[in-house]
Amino acid sequence: MIRLFCGHDEREAIGTHVFISSVLRRTSQPVSFLPLNIKGMQRDGSNAFIYSRFLVPWISGYKGTAIFADGADMLCRADIAELWDLQDPHMAVQVVKHDYISQYTRKYVGTSMEANNESYSRKNWSSLMIINCAHYAWRKITPESIVDMSGPDLHRFTFIDERYIGMLPFAWNHLVMEYPHSQNVKIAHFTLGIPAFKEYRHCPFAGEWQDEVREVTRHIDANYE
């Protein structure tokens, strides 16, 4: 069973459902979904799961393996089992190691979530993770300890020895509008804003995202109120 924790924010609720649908329609293995939105964990940032993602090992009892994906602003275009098969038991975490400076100074433009889009070291590394919940490095991350840790320290994994931060192929966390368009993308990450938002309605992969919305809703009676 693939354990998949996905970020959820009520302001992007449609995005969570689109992501889950896109995973389910392509997976070759059973998947358990755990939408993640722990109340009271949001100290700053623009979404409700900005820090709760780091509690996945604690939630899992420091056992087994789990995938965390931002989810609410992602579209899965491949079999999630392919990502699951990339897990390395010697690593504490595996991520796509982005190294870029954003072309955009604002994100979620035109919405209640609009915010500055700052560039910093290891930006977006934590948006897609294969997590070895049993690795000793995660034992120091608890609901109590996380309160005293800074956002940059968490997102840059300063609590994990560099040797135990593994790399994933870039196709599994393609940053839409930041990277050149490619049809080989496995997960499209609308990090600046999902196509439900007017500003991003025509961004790359928006058509596929909107197709997924129609797939989610196609069985609803047209007269339903």
Image: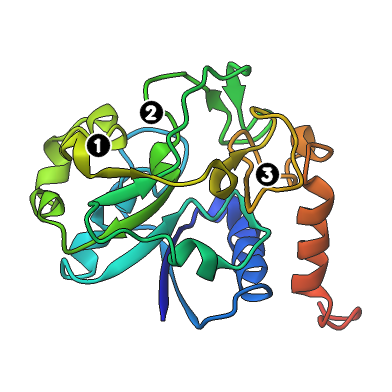
Find residue 24 and report its horizontal and vertical position in percent.
62, 75
Q: CA distance from mark 1 to mark 3?
A: 26 Å
Give the camera-side residue of 47 and 135: 135
Res 122 label: 2
The three-letter amino acid code for the residue at tag 3 is Ile
Find residue 82 and report its horizontal and vertical position in percent.
53, 65
Of circles 1 and 3, the one toward us is 1
Point out the tag, 1 or 3, that comes first from the N-terminus. Answer: 1
Secondary element at image label 1: loop
Point out the tag, 2 or 1, that comes first from the N-terminus. Answer: 2
Secondary element at image label 2: loop
Q: Residue at x 59, y 46 (%)?
A: 171
Q: Which residue lies under the disc numbered 3? A: 194
Q: CA distance from mark 3 to mark 2?
A: 22 Å
Q: Residue at x 39, y 49 (%)?
A: 49
Q: In this rendering, would 218 be left or right of 162?
A: right
Q: Which residue lies under the disc numbered 1? A: 157
The three-letter amino acid code for the residue at tag 2 is Arg
The three-letter amino acid code for the residue at tag 1 is Phe
Q: Residue at x 84, y 50 (%)?
A: 207
Of circles 3 and 2, the one toward us is 2
107 vs 51: above or below: above
Q: In this rendering, would 168 be left or right of 163?
A: right
Classify mark 2: residues with Cα within 10 Å, few (<14), some (14-19) or many (20+).
some
Classify mark 3: residues with Cα within 10 Å, few (<14), some (14-19) or many (20+).
many
Give the camera-side residue of 39 and 90: 90
| Quarter of the view holding residue 20 | bottom right
Secondary element at image label 3: loop
Q: Are marks 2 and 1 in contact (CB under 8 Å)?
A: yes
Rendered-image quadrant of the C terminus: bottom right
